[in-house]
Image (cartoon, helix red, strand yellow):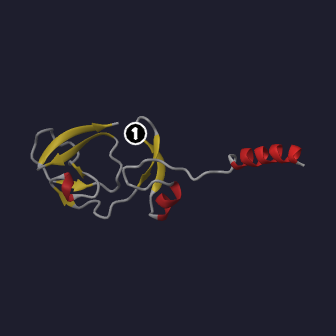
Amino acid sequence: MSRFLAPALCLVVLLAGCAPAERTASASSGVATESACRERGGEWKALGMAGIEQCMLPTADGGKACTDNAQCEGVCMAPEGAADGARATGTCSVDNDVFGCRQHVSQGTVVAICVD
């Protein structure tokens, strides 16, 4: 009987490894699984140059006027066409995606920032 028990146990262990797993990632949003992301109204997608899957969540204050990132859930985006170093009022981003090259408003001043 034990002759059949060891192979059977090995088969069970191998098959358990084939079960679909919850997709996880270390996300800047603090949401680590795809299902939790979707429950919060987010979009699970590959972000940044590394293409790491993360949760992109909408922000509650998207479109609100701002002069610094600290005033937003996401970032304070500079007005389109603003010159680096210019004084400006921006708008809070509509989601928490920080990747790419963009102009932000920091302490009332436009700065170019690239995040990969």
Q: Quadrant of residue 14?
A: top right
Which residue is most to the right? 1
- Classify residue 19 as left or right of residue 23: right
Quadrant in the picture for the C terminus: top left
Q: Which residue is mark 1?
A: 48
Q: Nearer the viewer, residue 56 or 15?
A: 15
- Classify residue 74 as left or right of residue 54: left
Q: Position of residue 24 (x, y in %)?
A: 51, 50
Q: Position of residue 90 (x, y in %)?
A: 19, 53
Tell me the element at label 1. loop
User: What is the three-letter code of the residue carrying label 1?
Assistant: Gly
Q: Nearer the viewer, residue 26 or 9?
A: 9
- Classify residue 116 as left or right of residue 81: right
- Please report the residue visible at 15 percent of the width from the left and 38 percent of the height from the top: 84
Q: Nearer the viewer, residue 87 or 98?
A: 98
Report the label total: 1
Q: Quadrant of residue 82?
A: top left
- Please report the residue visible at 45 percent of the width from the left and 63 percent of the height from the top: 41
Neighbours of disc 1 within 10 Å: few (<14), some (14-19), many (20+): some
Which residue is most to the left? 87
- Please report the residue visible at 21 percent of the width from the left and 38 percent of the height from the top: 112
Q: Position of residue 49 (x, y in %)?
A: 41, 35
- Please report the residue visible at 15 percent of the width from the left and 47 percent of the height from the top: 106
Which residue is most to the front? 2
Q: Position of residue 9 (x, y in %)?
A: 78, 48
